[in-house]
Image: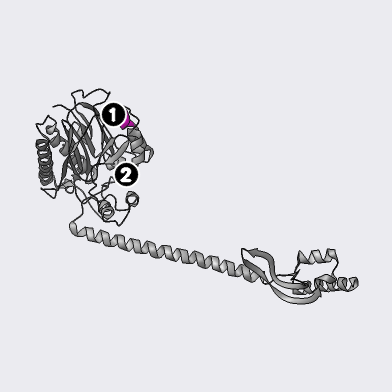
């Protein structure tokens, strides 16, 4: 049966990229996000090829099993087509694309996924990530080496471990079937959204209850407000609900919406000299699929980086403590050049240091007990001594004591 619900798709180049290598599709039963990679033109071609191949699946299915098989077979066929395309167009070598696709069959969502685009389910006020990122940092998260929050800012967060590319004709694709129900809101997006807008803000926007088109607009605006360093593609799928149903015309966005599709002009011959060396396109791909042996090197490099950070942190703390200790020692040394006249329990005393204390630490010590009894002083003189009298030097402190002694002698 034809899916009963509503949907919307939107795609934007972002604020940094010079072209849009994402593609998106929202049809009657089929919904897709594909994030292309591989240089200025290669990503366009890869994601467009994926949409062109998969849109043939936008039809009713007798069973979820049939839909799951069709989806898996079509994605594998796309991988072969990418390889064939590169053989005809060698300048596109290295291109690839993520694919996150969903077919609605009765009360079920049939899902296929490879790469780091994502599918979320918003149900009863809670947002759940349904797909698993096929990335290096996700492997680190799964192994407990880093936290999900650390993964958001990890320098290797864009390195893909699995992708639909021009190297593997039999890619490993995640496929599964999930029950869905009226009121569910599905989100398919490229990492241009999920890498910029965090899940609490995505959930809040999905929970506003706006129509799919307006919801997609709001999510795109948040990505743009966050800098949008990559292409942004969003597909919203509502199950049931009060919004208008599918109009009958699929919505295709991003590079796949280009009328010329994959007919990318042949690259001009590159000339290279010591004055004008060949350079890569300014629109560098944000991620790539590493060779298997590269993973261990990445892990070892991360270990080295972690050790360097640890050593740097320890060195920094030690340096700060050393500076604080040096400042404290210099300050204490200065206090020991100061003197003042005060009192102990019953006599006048010359103290070395200053009158202040730092918590339980006294910054002064008795230097000389004058043996002048406090009881021999007048009430005013006694109060003055108990309150301490600052001196500019040791000789000045002794002069003050001499004056006190005269006062004591006069009072006896």
Q: Which residues are magenta?
A: 210-217
Q: Quadrant of residue 198?
A: top left
- SS assignment at label 1: helix
- SS assignment at label 2: loop
**Marks 2/1: CA–CA distance:** 21 Å
Q: Which residue is mark 1?
A: 212
Please state the horizontal and vertical placement of residue 237, each as a whole percent of the image.
24, 31
Tell me the quadrant of the picture where the C terminus can be found.
Answer: bottom right
What residue lies at 36% left-to-right and 40% top-to-bottom? 200
What residue lies at 38% left-to-right and 38% top-to-bottom? 225
What colouring method underlies this structural image?
one colour
What residue lies at 44% left-to-right and 66% top-to-bottom? 315
Which secondary structure dominates the residues rendered in magenta? helix
Q: Which residue is mark 2?
A: 195
What residue lies at 72% left-to-right and 72% top-to-bottom? 351
Out of 303 and 207, give the one closest to the viewer: 207
Q: Is residue 205 left or right of residue 317?
A: left
Q: Determine contact: label 2, label 1, CB under 8 Å.
A: no
Please state the horizontal and vertical placement of residue 289, each as a whole percent of the image.
20, 51
Out of 185 and 260, give the one closest to the viewer: 185
Q: Tell me if mark 1 has few (under 14), some (14-19) or many (20+) residues whose alpha carbon lies within 10 angstroms of its own.
A: many
Please state the horizontal and vertical placement of residue 189, each as a whole percent of the image.
26, 38
Asked whether the viewer can see residue 286, the reply is yes
| On screen, residue 164 above or below 290 | above
Q: Quadrant of residue 108?
A: top left
């Amino acid at each position: 049966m034809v899916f009963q619900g509503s949907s919307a798709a939107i795609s934007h180049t972002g604020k940094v990229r010079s072209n849009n290598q994402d593609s998106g599709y929202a049809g009657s039963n089929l919904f897709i996000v594909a994030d292309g990679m591989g240089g200025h033109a290669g990503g366009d071609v890869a994601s467009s090829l994926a949409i062109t191949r998969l849109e043939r699946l936008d039809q009713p299915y007798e069973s979820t099993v049939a839909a799951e098989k069709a989806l898996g077979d079509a994605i594998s066929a796309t991988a072969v087509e990418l390889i064939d395309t590169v053989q005809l167009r060698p300048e596109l070598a290295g291109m690839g694309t993520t694919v996150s696709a969903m077919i609605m069959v009765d009360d079920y969502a049939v899902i296929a996924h490879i790469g780091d685009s994502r599918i979320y389910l918003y149900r009863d006020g809670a947002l759940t990530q349904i797909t698993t990122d096929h990335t290096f940092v996700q492997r680190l998260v799964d192994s407990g080496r880093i936290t999900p929050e650390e993964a958001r800012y990890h320098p290797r967060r864009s390195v893909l471990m699995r992708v639909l590319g021009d190297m593997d004709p039999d890619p490993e694709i995640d496929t599964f079937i999930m029950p869905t129900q009226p009121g569910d809101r599905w989100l398919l997006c490229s990492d241009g959204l999920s890498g910029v807008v965090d899940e609490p803000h995505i959930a809040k926007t999905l929970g506003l209850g706006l129509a799919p088109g307006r919801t997609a607009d709001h999510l795109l605006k948040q990505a743009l407000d966050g800098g949008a360093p990559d292409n942004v593609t969003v597909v919203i799928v509502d199950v049931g609900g009060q919004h208008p149903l599918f109009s009958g015309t699929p919505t295709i966005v991003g590079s796949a919406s280009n009328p010329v599709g994959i007919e990318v002009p042949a690259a001009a011959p590159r000339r290279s000299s010591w004055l004008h060396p060949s350079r890569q396109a300014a629109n560098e791909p944000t991620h790539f699929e590493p060779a298997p042996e590269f993973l261990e090197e990445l892990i070892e490099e991360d270990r080295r980086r972690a050790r360097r950070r640890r050593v740097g942190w320890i060195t920094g703390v030690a340096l700060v403590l050393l500076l604080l200790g040096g400042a404290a020692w210099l300050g204490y040394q200065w206090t020991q050049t100061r003197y003042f006249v005060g009192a102990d329990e019953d006599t006048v005393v010359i103290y070395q240091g200053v009158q202040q204390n730092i918590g339980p630490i006294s910054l002064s010590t008795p230097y000389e007990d004058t043996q002048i009894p406090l009881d021999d002083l007048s009430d005013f003189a006694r109060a003055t001594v108990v309150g301490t009298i600052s001196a500019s030097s040791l000789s000045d402190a002794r002069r003050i004591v001499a004056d006190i002694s005269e006062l004591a002698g006069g009072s006896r």
